[in-house]
Amino acid sequence: MPTFGGISPAASSGLAALAPHAAAGVSNSAGPVEDSQEAPTPVSLYVHVPFCVSKCAYCDFYSEAAVDPARYAQFVDAVLFEAGHWSHYDLLDDVPTIYIGGGTPTIMGDELVRLVEGLMQTVRLRPGAEVTVETNPETTDIQMVARLVEAGVNRFSIGVQSFDDSVLRTLGRCHDVAQTQRALQALRESDIPFSIDLICGVPGQTFPSWEATLEQAVASGARHASVYPLAVEPGTPLEAAVLEGRTPAPDPDVAADMMLAAEVALTVGGMPRYEVANYAQPGHEARHNLVYWTGGAYLGVGPHAASMLPYPLYEAVAAGEGWEVAAPDAAHVPARARFTREVTLAEYLRYPLRRPEPLELLTAPDAAREDVMLGLRLTAGVLASQVDAAGLGGVLQDLAEQGLVELGADDSGDLRWATTQAGWLLGNQVFGAVWAGPEGS
């Protein structure tokens, strides 16, 4: 049964998968990073916008629908205050990517523009930094796109999911294909690169429907595409519908066939696959997501946003904030800290600097295994030397005997481990074995 390895990189934990307003912004320093004697640690920024027009049937991300628009300004104030606060720890002195996701950020309209403008004044963006905003068809128009581009956005990600209205209804989406086409036209006219999200394996979705969706995705002008098999997440309306027999459960074998069809269609259309679920024209890979998959540091701002920092950086913040940090024993010295702030919107607005919870500390061996695990999400794979340094050579040999990974030379002649087609489709089996380590240690 295919499992794909649909891990959310911003929330991965072993096997799981960011002039300001006068009342809020704290300007750290504007402009590009300049040379200094000690270069700052690159830290990408993720901002989680918890607002939606309505909740989709399958979505388990934290967001609230039908919120009083007055909350938008309060939220932007809180985010700019929080980002400004963390900037005083030099966390945002070299920001290679910003990703504003959610939720549906563009539902905030003018307040989203203010958010982008405020962040530009708060962080030190690396020259050529990637600045992405997520959007949905029902909240995308040419005026909003133009204002965001003027504010500094240089990439969009649009949640299309399907070019079939019946499939959209099953997913509980609040847009239709006509709105999608108008939104895509607005993005094309901006001449700014954009990515398109698609979902396959939806109950009732036919192969002709899926093939037509892929054809329109290739013709849309997108330079990047993400293709995900539908998953039934706990607590969602989709789970309730499946449990009550109102909707059949997604068939993973059908989803696997649709993923294979997507790889062919998108590759032929000029967007080869470079990661488990992601395709791009060469040079248009999602740099922010690559931070997740290559062990880079990222700071999450907003309710339920995830962060991952080198432990010395986290330790400095914890000391400055007065957070109690347990003294690690000599055998388990932390190398990384991964944390979220699992609070409601109301709690976040009251106190945006709340201590993060939950917190997970990774030792150097943990981090090395995780880097291999996430690196195997990429079609380029991971260096054999990195696998050996992590103590995972035997694990990869065992997976190779099962036909799930293979060893080969890259264009530079370096040996790399990468998943086979079977390993791609059975991704969680590969990732689970890598995370468990030798003999499940």
Image (spheres, helix red, strand yellow):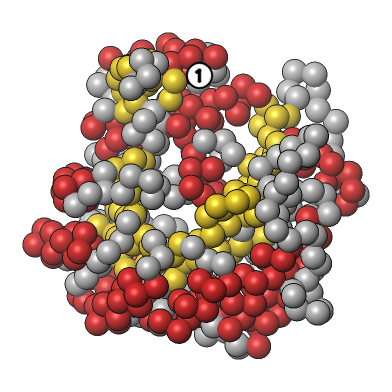
The amino acid type found where label 1 is placed reads: Gln
Q: Residue 369's x, y, as percent?
A: 53, 25
The residue lying at 66 percent from left, 24 percent from top is 364
Residue 190 lies, with reference to residue 41, above or below; the image says below
The residue lying at 26 percent from left, 44 percent from top is 272
**Which quadrant of the figure has residue 421?**
top left
In this rendered view, identify the residue nearer to me: 131 or 37.
37
16 lies left or right of 80: left
Residue 345 in sight from this viewpoint: no
Residue 10 lies, with reference to residue 409, above or below; the image says below
Q: Residue 121's x, y, as percent?
A: 72, 66
The residue lying at 43 percent from left, 25 percent from top is 382
Q: Which residue is mark 1?
A: 386
* Local crowd size for mark 1, using a 10 Å CA cut-off: few (<14), some (14–19), many (≥20): some
Give the quadrant of the C terminus.
top right
Residue at disc 1, secondary structure: helix
In this rendered view, identify the residue nearer to me: 362 or 217.
217
In this rendered view, identify the residue nearer to me: 192 or 4.
192
The residue lying at 44 percent from left, 71 percent from top is 135
Q: Residue 88's x, y, as percent?
A: 83, 54
Q: Residue 309's x, y, as percent?
A: 69, 41
